[in-house]
Image (cartoon, grey):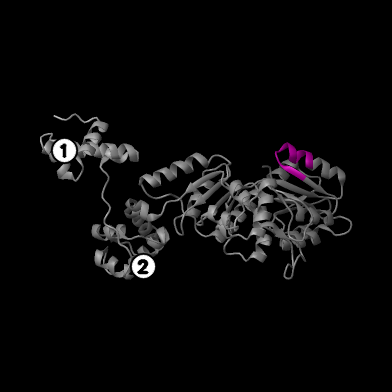
Amino acid sequence: MPDTILIIDDEAAIRESLAGILADEGFAPLTAASAEEGLQLLDEKDVRLILLDIWMPGMDGLEALKLIKQRFALPVIMISGHGTIETAVQATRSGAYDFIEKPLSYDKTILSIKKGLQLAHLERENQLLRESGPTPISITGNSALTARLRQQIERVAPTDAWVLIRGGHGTGKELVAQTIHRHSLRGKQPMVAVNCAAIPEELIESELFGHVKGAFTGATENKKGKFDQANGSTLFLDEIGDMSLKSQAKVLRILQEQTFERVGGSRTIEVDVRVLAATNKNLEEEIERGLFRADLFYRLNVVPIVVPDLVDRREDIPQLVADFINQFSRKGIEWKQFSAEALSLLQRHTWPGNIRELRNLVERLVIMTTGDEINVEDVALFLGNAPLLLPPTQPIDPIYRHLGFKDARRRFETDYLLAKLEENDGNISKTAEQIGMERSHLHKKVKALGIAVK
């Protein structure tokens, strides 16, 4: 999607000439004949950079510059046919990115625009990264479930399809969303995340769609919403199941039409947004209870991805622990290792808090235990009276690893009965008695499995 450049100049010839050159360079030019008209367009359009004339009737460029810098985080390039060193210094001190004199050198103007956009992109990305916090960079683990999850991500990421990510608390749903985004065509832009559960119902519309000055008490200036920020990128709606029905209705219309109005505004704004959503709730049950809109569910659920609980991928725990220790060591926390017995005990825990709970426990152990190795007694002490410790995981026989359940069961039954029949010299009656099965039933099973009896 081309970057929109707003040209504010009272001379029609300058506006038309600049607009044509910008269009040829692949930008989307937007023009205004006055500062007042330009400020109105900034409230309505997703502008990325401004070319602003200084001398104009009505509000002049320097006054408009101050208002723009107060209300919008955008680079502004000042242009003037009556420029002086004093004017250039004043413009720079007021926040202008650059100052270009008329008659314009178009090569210099295009170069300044490209550099300004590059700087604006970096500042915008840094701001969003600061708001969202550190972003993980990989899906850790080699279990069958984790491998399948990675395969699903690899298939859906390069497309523009919407994805509904489902899984329990702490399973890593946001990590999945980040990974999908980074491997998408929109990955060069920062992903914009919204925690639908953390925003009060009365504020969620303003957070998502933005608002105009005076729309409600406390709205002292115009504000762009998350949909604006995600234009050309990806919007991640975390905990979508906690959104109110009223907000769901508004979001559904925007998702369908990719247009919206800011709270208190009347202008229609168009966006190009890919949506990823996540929830820990059973949305089908929420629909039956009347708490979630079925039409919104079907709109979001284009490609469903289920993130498995940690208890179902316990073989990934040693690798996860190693990754966490490396992350902590980069923060200055002393590097330690877990004994094999300690890792085995971690694999026996049920992990109701999933990966988040494991990470917190590993960090606690690394900080609070003495010595270079964390042993099974340390883990047992910090787990306390943890409920339902499962037996240690047993490695799957390579014979069964790549078989489906039915084929694996048939293979096991065949191997098991062959071994038992061999122990009893092929005697069906004796074998049936030994394994606790009726003779007629065993005979049918042997026949069904194609086992040749001596």
Residue ID at (25%, 59%): 339
The answer to which of 389 and 205 lies nearer the viewer is 389
Q: CA distance from mark 1 to mark 2?
A: 49 Å
Quarter holding the N terminus? top right
Q: Earlier in the sequence, mark 1 or mark 2?
A: 2
Classify mark 1: helix, strand or loop: helix
Q: Is residue 375 visible?
A: no
Give the amino acid type for the residue marked by disc 2 in the picture: Arg
**Residue at label 1?**
419
Q: Which residue is mark 2?
A: 364
**Which of the pair 370/212 is nearer the observer?**
212
Q: Position of residue 32 (x, y in %)?
A: 83, 50
- Contact between marks 1 and 2 (CB within 8 A): the answer is no
Name the residue located 25 percent from the left edge and 39 percent from the top edge. Answer: 412
- Residue 140 position in % (x across, y down): 39, 50
Please identify the quarter of the rendering in which residue 193 is found: bottom right
The magenta region covers: 19-29
Position of residue 403 relative to residue 378, above or below, is above
